[in-house]
Each structure stands twice: as structure tokens, then as C-alpha cells.
Amino acid sequence: MQESAPEPVSTSWQPSVALLKLRADHQASVPALGAERAIHYTEFYKANRISSPALRKARALADHLARRSIRIHPGEVIVGSHTEHRIGAICFAELAGVAMLEDIFRFPSRRTDPLHIDPAARRKLLFSVIPYWLSKNLAAQAFPLLKRLAYFRDQLAGKRFIITEAGGVAHFLPNYADLIGQGTEGLRTRIAKVMNRQPAWPKENRDQLEANLIALEALEAFADRYRKLAAELGRQDIVEVLDVVPRKPAATLRQALQMIWLFQMIIQIESLDQGISLGRLDQYLYPLYKKEVSDDSFDADGIAGDLGEEAFHLVQPGSRGRREVEMEARVLFQPLLDLSVLVGGVGGLNEERPLSALGPGWVETPRLIRCVFGRCSSVACLRKLVQSAG
């Protein structure tokens, strides 16, 4: 006999007062330049001469996450932000960030996505970050002198609009099904097994695996900092989630959403976003949804609210609600323009699931955010851009 599916959450869901308050707080926040990453990476690279590129980058990430300023804002149940600011623009100094710092004196007053910049941070960027990375950033090392100068000229003039090619890893979907099903401890065990099976691997290969372990430990320590802060603030609900994730497999939908956001956030901190998406969110969250819906304490509105907050974190909207930004702003002010989430469909692996019905509810019903949102069929995926009311 075919197993009956749980009843879907109503698509007539409306955002709670708490979620609307969170939206209002986000919109009231002043977008700012997140300079800590550039400053921390510069200080680390100056002080540490590590020959392996993979190990050097991993240890720089770990150093940054250990020092990064963090906050838990009132009303949040899923914690974390890309920068030290609630709405912040990451400066990837070793990638394309130095070129973007041509606006360092115009950020607060520029027409497209103005950004507040702290005077002390501006001084460090001017006298430490820019001089160090001017000849060491990715584009500077990729070309001989004359081609390098031509590249910089074309990029800064917006002639080709391809500055994001200097931005890092792009266009892939992390395996979030594995992540929420294993946790960082499970991933660490898998990496250790690979290393033990291949003791004679070249040093470069083993360095990459060691860098993976360093990054996982850094993520755990970063989450521990949030857990400690949550305990100090009396936020036991957050403490209970971070007691489990990211180390252990997620046992609830909220834990899974926090796990996904932690990894997505670290990926964005490490490498400029270009199409790093969540994939079939409804499919890999469905087992947890099915487990929770069978419990007497099942709270459909609460789950929909958590999903709404997750989506709100993912797009990081600016206070003015703008998403059509100039190319010069796109690399530095990073609102995850190319994020995709696919749900729904009919037949086979694309079978419509009750959790799929939540998708339009997060985005269309409350019109809280805008996001590239897809609904799959068994033949093709159709995308539509959901416009916000702002």
C-alpha cells in the first residue's frame, strides 16, 4: 500500500508579527562595507609564510572566523551574517576587492547602493590592505604587465562587465543533503578515511584534504562563538540548536536550516558568490518535515516562519530594496544575486511534496524578499524572478 503523504502546510500562510519585525529591522539597517575580512586576511598573509596555497587560505579563513565581530539580533532564530554588519558588503581583497576600493571615498555618497564605511576601517584599507594586495591579487598575478594594465583598465571602465571572473569559485550546488545528514563530524571522518587510504598521495592532494579539515574546525568554532553569545543573551532556543549543529546531523528542520545557513555563509565569506545555490531544498528537507509533521507538537506556522527567515538571510536585502545594481557595486556589495532554489514538480525524483507548497509562501505571499525561485517539472525547470514590494 502506498504511504500517504503528510498534509501540506497551507499556502495561505502569512508572515508572523515577529518575521515582519525582522524585515523592518533589516530595512532600517544601514548597509556598510565589511572590512574585517580584508583586514584580517591581509594581517594573516603578512605574518604567515605558508607554502601551500590551500593550507594558507584555510588558516586565513580560520583566523578571520575566530576574530570576526558577531551579533545576535533581537527576534532572530537563525543566526549569522556575512560580515561584521547586519547588512554588509564583503571586500575580497585577494580577488577583485582592491579594484572595487576605487570607491573608498565615494561609498557613502555613490548613487548605487551607498555603503557606510568606518573611518578606522578606511585607514586600514588605504594603508595596509590596498598596498599589500595591489600586486598580489588574482588578476594581477594572472597576466604579464601590459595585459594586466589593459585588464584593469577595461574592468574599471566597465567595458566588458566580466569583473566577476576574478571573483573565485562559482556556479555549483553544495551537497546539503549530505551536510545535514552527517554534520561536520561525519565529513571529518570521511576525509580522514580518504587520507588513510591514500598515504602516498602527493603533498598537494594531502594539503587540500588537510585544508578541508581546518575549514570544518573553523566553522565549528565560529558556531561555538554564536552559541556562547546566545547563552549570554539568554537565548536558550538558539543554544539548543547550536548544541547539535554543525557537528551532528540535523534532527529538526530548524537545525537543518541553521546548518545550511552556516555553510552557505562560510562559502560566501571564502569566495565571491556567483550562483552558489541551495538546489532541491524541498527534497532534502522532506524527511525532517515528515518526521515533525507526525508529532503532536507540529507547528506549521512556526516551520513556515523559519523558512521565511532562512530565505530572508539568503538574499540579504539592502535597506532601499534595490536589486538592480551597477557592476561596480555587484562585486563588493553582495546580495547573492544568483541564488536559486528549486521546489516542486511532478513524477519521479521531481515528485511534488507537501513541503514544496511552502516555497511560494515564503516569497510571494508575504512579499518579504526577492529571490530566483524555480518550480521543477519532470521535463524542465522554469524560473521566475519574484519581485519584492519594496
Image (spheres, helix red, strand yellow):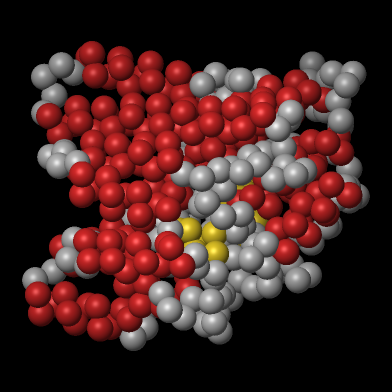
* Residue 217, quarter of picture: top left
* Residue 50, quarter of picture: top left
Q: Nearer the viewer, residue 278 or 54?
A: 54
Q: Residue at x 35, y 54 (%)?
A: 39
**Side of 281 relative to 22 (left or right):** left
**Side of 377 relative to 64 (left or right):** right
Q: Is residue 142 above or below residue 347?
A: below
Q: Residue at x 31, y 49 (%)?
A: 41
Q: Position of residue 115 (x, y in %)?
A: 54, 71
Q: Position of residue 195 (x, y in %)?
A: 24, 19
Q: Nearer the viewer, residue 376 or 241?
A: 241
Q: Is residue 156 above or below residue 30?
A: below
| Quadrant in which the N terminus appears | top right
Q: Position of residue 303 (x, y in %)?
A: 79, 36
Q: Residue at x 73, y 30 (%)?
A: 235
Q: Position of residue 370 (x, y in %)?
A: 68, 62
**Side of 45 relative to 119 (left or right):** left
Q: Nearer the viewer, residue 229 or 370?
A: 229
| Quadrant in which the C terminus appears | bottom right
Q: Residue at x 64, y 66 (%)?
A: 30
